Image (cartoon, rainbow, N blue to C red):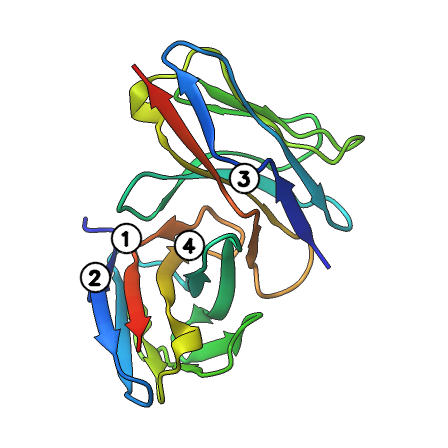
Amino acid sequence: NAGVTQTPKFQVLKTGQSMTLQCAQDMNHEYMSWYRQDPGMGLRLIHYSVGAGITDQGEVPNGYNVSRSTTEDFPLRLLSAAPSQTSVYFCASSYGGRETQYFGPGTRLLVL
Amino acid sequence: GDSVTQMEGPVTLSEEAFLTINCTYTATGYPSLFWYVQYPGEGLQLLLKATKADDKGSNKGFEATYRKETTSFHLEKGSVQVSDSAVYFCALRASGGSNYKLTFGKGTLLTVNP
């Protein structure tokens, strides 16, 4: 049981480049979400999904896209990276939205 | 909107000292309250939680009591160890709404010296 896994661990992008941050869980959790962590600001919700085929926006969705084609995977896409997206990104999952959320180890992203 | 305020860090203590990290919140209704811990280079782990007023969450010697009258959820430990060095986040989840988001405080860095 690997829990919540994220790849890559670290990535450097140039402004305008695109990339996908991967998130997978093997706990059959219905609810998955993406947060970004910035210094002095705690974590903020980007997008979330309550099940395969269902996604919705969190509080800071601009510049990010998500999809949920399977229960296990919830990738986060940056279509055109900007320096303001430099951050640490965490994926989380839970059985339901009101159950304990389990976090992945994070992806550190630097946009130059 | 909902918000969480926790004491500014960093906090530096000697081993076996008493720890308190203050956390207060603003939310309507009866949110669920959480403390998460982030060890260096790792993701967040749930430390403890409380889902209704006067509940006490506890784990690994840490405790926090949900105080509705003071809108607080302060984290305490009687005797800290070097291995407790980490960043601690207080968080809430609103009782209503459909996004189930966690609203986090800014985090408090704790360093415990031998």
Residue marked by disc 4 = A95
Residue marked by disc 2 = A9
Circle 1: residue type = Pro
Using a 10 Å C-alpha cutoff, classify the residue at mark 3 as few (fewer than 14 neighbours), some (14 to 19) or many (20 or more): many
Q: Secondary structure at mark 4?
A: loop
Which of discs 2 and 4 lies nearer the camera? The answer is: 2
Circle 2: residue type = Lys
Residue marked by disc 3 = B34
Which of discs 2 and 3 lies nearer the camera? The answer is: 2
Task: Identify the disc placed on residue A105.
Answer: 1
Circle 4: residue type = Tyr
Disc 4/disc 1 C-alpha distance (Å): 19 Å
Can the viewer see residue B55 in this picture? yes
Using a 10 Å C-alpha cutoff, classify the residue at mark 1 as few (fewer than 14 neighbours), some (14 to 19) or many (20 or more): many
Task: Kindly indicate the quadrant of the structure image that contains residue A93.
Answer: bottom left
Whether tag 1 and tag 2 are in contact, CB under 8 A, the answer is yes
Left-right relation of A14 to B26: left
Identify the residue at image location x=77%, y=48%.
B29
Which of discs 3 and 1 lies nearer the camera? The answer is: 1
